[in-house]
Image: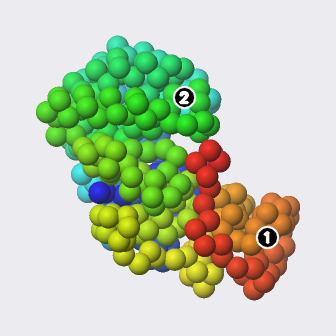
Amino acid sequence: MIIEMAPMEGITNYIYRRVFAAHFGGVDRYYTPFISPNQTESLQSREWKELAPENNQGLVVIPQLLTKNPEHFLWGAAQAADLGYEEVNYNLGCPSGTVVSKGKGAGMLRDADYLDRALDQIFSSCPIRVSVKTRIGIADPAEFERILDVYLRYPLSSLIIHPRVQKEFYKGDVHREIFAAAAERLAASGRNTSLIFNGNIATAEEAASLAKDFPGLSGVMLGRGMLTDPMLALKTKALMAAKDFSSRKETPVLTMEAFASFHEDLVRRNSEVLSGSHQVLHRLKEFWPYWYVNFTNGVKYWKRVRKARYYSDYEEAVCELFQKEEIIPGACFEAYSIR
């Protein structure tokens, strides 16, 4: 089963991907946080850095594009192709209100006819493979039947389904029955499209059980669950290799030494790129809403990190945590808490 790292804006950038792969790994495919091609036919410096081949050496990385305009998508895909990429991913799932209000991300799902026309234009001219990451609708899971009609018309390299509607954001249970129906329809279509499950996967047991529940599943995309537990991909692979949950191989364990080394490398690499300790502080603060659950007294230290005004305050809190606290074995966000 393929394991993918979900793209998370402001978090899983090229620095994080490289540091993660060096310290933990277990991920088969990575995705860039969304890149937004537009009418200017130019990208921001940050976006070019995400695409730069030298920043992704040794990793399988797929650029993700966010736009409602097929011409802009094709321009972005052409830039990716020129840099040597063989696939781009179309973001049709971002639930952000700002994104959706512009008709992008999950906002594309409001009008299945327009979505059909856009994909027709894209697949008529795109020089490389196209995959799709999607929600199942805007407000009603039943919307996905018509949306899937559209997807099944095109040779998607993979279809990554987060089985929630846009209005649900990351709250509540996912609609597994919708995913199951989609899996059946995709299998019956004869399309050579990989099917990937994304959403509310917090443990290796949950990830591995999906393979049993959906025999046609090609893989899982892990996001906040793996951000919380950076061993999640390795744990899932160990569990899958055992086949029988009762006779699993030894499960990898997150240690304080491993996490501290990972954190030190992440600080160093960000310090090399960002302008000053204040920017480094703000970047690292983004991770701690997910990390703190791994540690005894984690809430206490998360509050200190959140209130830190200077990097020295942050460093003091984190060093004290590494020295005085312990890793909680098997800690994770419960599925309902993943945001």
Query: Number of callouts in the render?
Result: 2
Nearer to the camera, 318 or 11? 318
Considering only vertical position in the picture, is 201 above or below 67? below
Q: Which mark is residue 71?
A: none
Observer-nearest of 92 and 203: 203
Observer-side mark, 1 or 2, equals: 1
Which amino acid type is marked by label 2? Gln
User: In this orientation, which residue lies closer to the viewer: 183 or 339?
Assistant: 183
Q: Secondary structure at mark 1?
A: loop
User: Quadrant location of residue 123?
Assistant: top left
Mark 2 nearby-residue class (10 Å; few <14, some 14–19, many ≥20):
many
- Residue 101, horizontal then vertical, whole percent: 58, 23
Q: CA distance from mark 1 to mark 2?
A: 34 Å
Q: Residue at x 70, y 57 (%)?
A: 289
Residue 290 position within the rendered picture, expressed as x and y whole percent measured from the top left: 65, 59
Q: What's under tag 1, amino acid-wise?
A: Asn
